Amino acid sequence: MSGLDRRAFLRTIAGGTAGFAVARRTFAQAPQSAPSPPPITVTKLTDRVAVFGGDGGNVAVVTGPDGLLMIDGGYADRAALLASAVAGVDPRAVRILFNTHYHFDHTGCNESLGARHVRLVAHENVGRRLRTRFDNPAMGRTMEALAESGWPTETFATDGTLAFGRDTVSYAHTPMAHTDGDAYFLLPASNVLHAGDLLWAGRYPVVDYTVGGSLARMAEALGEIDGVILDDTRIVPGHGPASVTRAEMRRIRLMWQTINDRLERHAAAGDSIEAVIAAAPTREFDLQVSVRNPQPFLRQAFGGVLARAHQRAR
Ligand SMILES: [Zn+2]
């Protein structure tokens, strides 16, 4: 985050709803040719849980007696706008920021909130990734390290609980699913679960196989989530609508399993990615998820299948 963005962020935190004007001015200074990003949307799931959508991952904000708990933080260049949107719902300070994984579209508030001594909680592999710049072929880019203020202050290896006001909230790591550091976050008193990027609704998922991700394990992770929720639990996906139902999550899991089975058969036959794409293994699902070009997803998902086969062969 640039110094300008950081100052704007701090002003919006301090200024509450006045922050909208600051944020607009920041965008007005952007080059004319830059497409304007989608607005940040707010959906209240309960009187205490709001989900903020936009172009980054879904952000959940929980209000407690002493301040806010935030699950994920969107893009860094949208942190100021997100902060003003959050302040519009509840102007009190964020006390805890939880990262569901290391991706930049979920950890964009780490540096700004970390600089204000907010507790940053994440899986230990998220800490490792955020400290390190590395090339990521699955994502087709270099993953930049965060400044030290954005590094988790508290990490965990498997699971844990947090006291937040009168509630106890919990989180659990699912190994090697979307990444190597995923965790879902459960709010039992509100009957809400934030799945991070273990769940994508209305689009195909990103599969970060460079760090151990695979569609097979993502489907298994949804099975693990299914085991800790109720029929009427609201599940916040990493991307897509503010929440989906358990039944919808089960449909998505079945779709991913079906696609993964087909990709594993292609891999066992020694097929190239071009042959996989030509066989259109997602054909009947493309309309359901409104995807016209499944190629980027197929390349990642098939890359994950090959990486897993390679691991098993060693
Ligand atoms: Zn992600």
Image: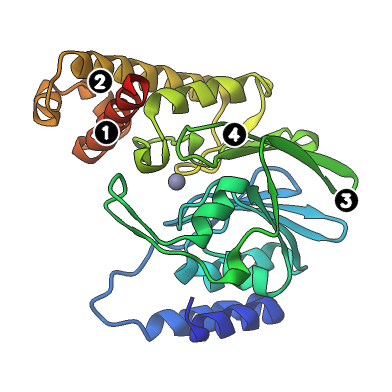
What separation in Å lies between label 4 and label 1 (alpha carbons)? 28 Å
| x 51%, y 80%: residue | 5
| x 55%, y 73%: residue | 80
The answer to whether the residues at label 4 and label 1 have Cβ atoms under 8 Å apart is: no
Q: List the single residue furthest toward the front.
A: 314
**Neighbour class for label 2 at 10 Å: few (<14), some, many (≥20)?**
many
What separation in Å lies between label 2 and label 3 (alpha carbons)? 46 Å
Q: Could one spot residue 266 in this view of the protein?
A: yes
Instruction: Classify residue 170 by image quadrant.
Output: top right
The answer to whether the residues at label 2 and label 1 have Cβ atoms under 8 Å apart is: no
What separation in Å lies between label 4 and label 2 (alpha carbons)? 27 Å
Q: Is residue 264 above or below residue 307?
A: above
Say which residue label 2 marks.
263
**Mark 1 CB in 8 Å range of ligand 1?**
no
**Neighbour class for label 1 at 10 Å: few (<14), some, many (≥20)?**
many
Along the viewing direction, whichever of 235 and 257 lies nearer the viewer: 257
As drawn, is 257 to the left or to the right of 195?
A: left
Of marks 1 and 3, the one in the foreground: 1
Of marks 4 and 2, the one in the foreground: 2
Q: Residue type at mark 3?
A: Gly
The answer to whether the residues at label 1 and label 3 have Cβ atoms under 8 Å apart is: no
Question: Residue 165, labelled with which disc?
Answer: 3
| x 57%, y 31%: residue | 174
As drawn, is 141 to the left or to the right of 231?
A: left
Q: Residue type at mark 2?
A: Leu
Q: Residue type at mark 1?
A: Gly
Say what secondary structure mark 2 lies in. Answer: helix
Say which residue label 4 marks.
235
How many marks can you see? 4
Indicate the colouring scheme.
rainbow
Say which residue label 1 marks.
303
